[in-house]
Amino acid sequence: MNPRELLLDSFHAAVNAADPLKIVPCHLPEPPRGNTLVVGAGKAAAAMARAVEENWPADHPLEGIVVTPYGHGLATNNIMVIEASHPVPDTQGEMAARAMLESARILTPNDLLLGLFSGGGSSLLSAPIPGVTLDELKSITRQLLRCGAAIQEINIVRKHLSVVLGGRLAAASRAPVHSLIISDVTDNDPSSIASGPCAPDPSTWQDVLALIERYAINIAPQTMGILQKNVNTGSNETPKLGDPVFRNVKNRIIATARQSLAAAAQFFRAQGITPLILGDTVTGEAKEIAKMHAAIAREIRHYSNPFKPPVALISGGETTVTVTGSGRGGRNAEFLLSLAIALNGLEEVYALACDTDGIDGNGTNAGAVITPDTLNRVEQADVNPVRLLDDNDAWTFFDQLDDLIVTGPTRTNVNDYRVVLVL
C-alpha cells in the first residue's frame, strides 16, 4: 500500500468510527408512554435522524425536525430534515429553530424530547433573541469567524443571541429530554457542542461583552444596548447548572475525536506502523501547530529516540486561522501548507489533514495531502508557497498540485484529523 493510500484509509477508519448509522442505535432511550419529538442540528443530524427512524419501535409514535447544512441531508420518513446555511446563518435555519421551539413547548410530561446534536449546530439554530435581527447575527458571526476566536468563545456569543441555544430548548419542554451528542469540541462539553441547546450554560452576558470588546467586534447600537442592559440587570440569562429545567434532562456523548483517533491508530498497527497519538485536543494557530508537528517528525526521522520509523503521528482537535489575507483557505489546508514549508522536503515524510465532516472551512474539500516532493512540484507550477500562506490561500496551493482531498459530506463531525507519516 502506498503512503497516500495509507493516509486516506486511516482517515476513512477515523470517520467510520463516528458513523451515526453505526453508533446511534445502541444509545437510544426507551420510548415514552406518549409521543416522541425528535429535534436536532448539526452536520450529523440527518444521519442521526435516519438511524433513529430505522431503529425506533414501529408501534411508538415518532415525529420531529432536524436541521443540517446544505448538501448534508438524507431522505427520512417521519422526521423532517431541513437544510440551512453554515457557518453563517440564514432564514432556513431560523425557521427550523423556531419550529423546534414551538413543538417542544406543546409536549407533555408523558412525552419525550429526543435531541440529536453534533458540530455545526450553532449556526443552524439561528433564531435570534428579540431585538436582534438575523442580518446582525450574520455580521457578528462573520467577524468572529475571521478574528481567530476559539470555537468555544464564538459559541458563548451565539448562545446568548439565540432563543434555542444555551439550554433554552430544554427549558421550553415539559417532557423529559434525552440528547445524543457527537462531539466536535476538545473538552467534549455538551454546553459547547452545537452551543448546547439542551445543556446548562456556564457562560454569562458579561462573558459576551468581554469577547465583543476583546476581538473588537462591530455590533449595532441596538444590539449593544441589549447586551449592556442584560449585563447590568442580569436578566434574560441562559439557564445554569442546578436550574430545575434540567431535572429531567440527560445529555449523552456518543462519539468523540478520541474514539476516531484510536480507530486510526488501530489501522496503522495492522499495517505494521507504530501510531503515536499526540492528542485529541490540539488547538492554536494552524500554521504554528504545523511547525510543532514538523519538529517531531524531524526528530523521529533523524535522531535517536524511542520511536523508530515507520511512525504515524496522529492528532485531533481544532486549530484556528486568523484571517489577514484574501485567499481561499481552510484550517487543514493551512496546516498542511505550513507543514510542507517547515519540512522543506524532508525525505519519507507524508501527511494528511482533513475535517471529519468532509468540509475544510468553506471549501468543497475535506482537506489535502503532502508528500516529500510537494515543494519541488509546486516550484514547477510557478507557485510561491510562502506568499500563498501569508495570503491564507492554501486551497489554491493544493488545487494547483491536485492534492486536495474531496469526499463530500460525511454526515458526521468529530473535528479535524491529522496524520504525519514518517517512513
Image (spheres, rainbow, N blue to C red):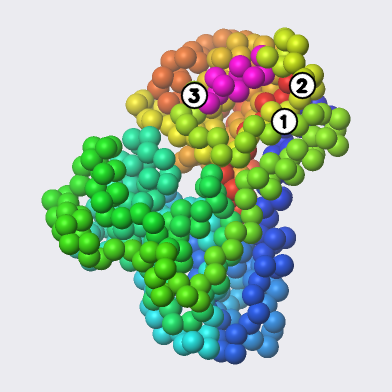
- Going from N to C along the chain, the mark reached first, 1 or 2, is 1
Q: Quadrant of the C terminus?
A: top right
| Residue lying furthest front | 242
Query: Callout 1: 10 Å neighbours few (<14), some, many (20+)?
Result: some
- Residue tagged 1: 276
The answer to whether residue 125 is above or below residue 271 is below
- Residue tagged 2: 307
Q: Looking at the image, do the residues carrying marks 3 and 1 touch, with CB atoms under 8 Å apart?
A: no
Query: In the figure, residue 348 lies in which quadrant?
Result: top right
What range of the chain is rendered magenta?
Answer: 289-298
State whether residue 64 appears in this view: no
Query: Callout 2: 10 Å neighbours few (<14), some, many (20+)?
Result: some
- Residue tagged 3: 287
Horizontal side of 298 relative to 117 (left or right) equals right
User: Which residue is nearer to you in this view: 41 or 91?
Assistant: 41
Horizontal side of 220 relative to 363 (left or right) equals left
- Residue 267 image position (x, y, % from top left): 80, 39
Which circle, 3 or 2, is nearer the viewer?
A: 2
- Residue 382 image position (x, y, % from top left): 52, 11
In space, the residues marked 3 and 2 are separated at their CA atoms by 25 Å
| Residue drawn at (65%, 45%) of the image | 258
| SS for dot 3 | helix
